[in-house]
Image: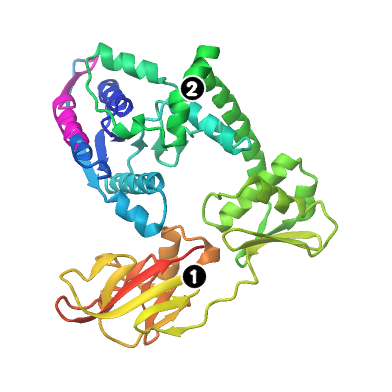
Amino acid sequence: MLCAVSGGADSVYLLDRLNCWRLARPFTLYAAHFNHRLRGEESDRDERFVRDFVKTRCGAQRVTYSDGAERVLPPVELIVGRGDVAAEAKRRGIGLEEAAREMRYAFLCEAAEKLGGALIATAHTADDNAETLLLHLLRGSGLRGLTGIQPVRGNLIRPMLEVTRAEVEEHLRIYSLPHVEDSSNASDDYLRNRLRHRAIPVLEELAPGFVARSRDTLRFLREDEEYLSARAETLAGQAIPRGEELVLPAALLAEAPPPLAARAVRALLARLRGGDTDLSAAHLESAAALCWGNDPSAEVHLPGGLTVRREYDLLVLGPDREKPLPPPLPLGFGDNRWGNWTIFCEKASCPAKAYADPNEFWLRPGDYLIRSRKTGDALTLGPRPRRTLKRLFIDKKVPAVRRDFVPVIDEGGLAAAAGDMGPDRSFLAVPGGDALHIILKREGE
């Protein structure tokens, strides 16, 4: 178990409870802290606090079993990550909250993978879930959004969704457990904070126990959503693959209740995109409505380069046929526009490390071409064994409909690098020698 610890009250509570729980049911427990470097000395203070807390409160523990046998549980090991969230947010043109969340979860997932696939526990509480419910109500949401924070998603678990913030504070008081306060939590710049500071107290005043009761409401909504989604998955399971498309009789969805039909469309689109979708209810309903109409050639274009269309009695879901592949382009100096990517190239001296990240590296000089993938493309990334580009796309969960639009940098018919994947090590420049400095940037989907 990898416990995410910020140093705040909720995460201190979670780590303490897990540390105690392993006495009754031994398991290996790790702690993880990510320093976002957003609050200067305060961020470093949080890191120091977590280091000290784990060292002093989560040491080795001796367990005596009912048969008299003894076992010493090892101390909790702390894994620390750091990142410049502000710089990443500026580079990608996204908000600080979004960048911080993505970098934090990327760090947690990488740490869990290195530990052999550990479960990741985060300290979301019943109060967080009530706030999420209100956020979704304000923004408009279907039943799925109203289920709030999911208790389990892959290897990510939220054991505290039944625990209120008041219960957390009482536990810390009883056991004299210290914690640190994030000064940004006091700011009303964020909508969630305004709900926490203004709306929730009013609701608790009008109806004492609102947060506690919302736990049951969310659980009931989640059970309803899980039932409907399971029925929809059964319906979607009747689709037949046809190349990169999925095909099923339109009558199957036309005869299904609208809530099931829309969820079945979501499930099918998720299969095409290699995971979940962020499509709105309006998108899903418009796609499902094709099954009820009389136009045998009607179609709906959706975000992400997907199209849902009627082919007489069939419903076909797949890549947008009207989006042509960018033609091959010789790699020149400066900015090279290829599809929705910009590939920057300049002459440079190779630094000590020829690889900065998957989209910035230094290649040996040569005549390169920018093209889409082709059968047989493969890359040897760093110390890892050579793998086909297709397998790398699958591992990175790149949706099938987008793979042809990822630029491949080619020399002599061989793939030297690919966008978001990185360079083949055999094409990297020698440190100190002549090189081509390459930076790839995707402008949009």
Please tell me which residue is depicted at 76% across the width and 43% down the height of the picture. Answer: 256
**From the viewer's perspective, is residue 39 above or below residue 317?**
above
Examine the image and state in which quarter residue 345 appears: bottom left
* Residue 200, numbered label: 2
User: Which residue: 40% across, 64% down?
Assistant: 392
The image position of residue 360, as x and y in percent, is 30, 68
Relative side of 304 to 250, left or right: left
Position of the N terminus, as image quadrant, is top left
* SS state under label 1: loop
Magenta-drawn segment: 46-67
Tell me where residue 181 appears, x and y as whole percent: 27, 28
Mark 1 — residue? 340
Which numbered tag is attached to residue 85? none
Residue 47 counted in the magenta span: yes
| Whether label 2 touches label 1, CB < 8 Å | no
Q: Is 224 situated left or right of 95 in this image?
A: right
Could you tell me residue 203's position as x and y percent? 53, 18
Q: Secondary structure at mark 2?
A: helix
Front disc: 2 or 1: 2
| Residue type indicated by callout 1 | Asn
Near mark 1 (Cα within 10 A), the count class, few <14, some 14-19 or many ≥20, is some
Q: Nearer the viewer, residue 398 or 314?
A: 398
Q: CA distance from mark 2 to mark 1?
A: 43 Å
Tell me which amino acid carries mark 2: Ile
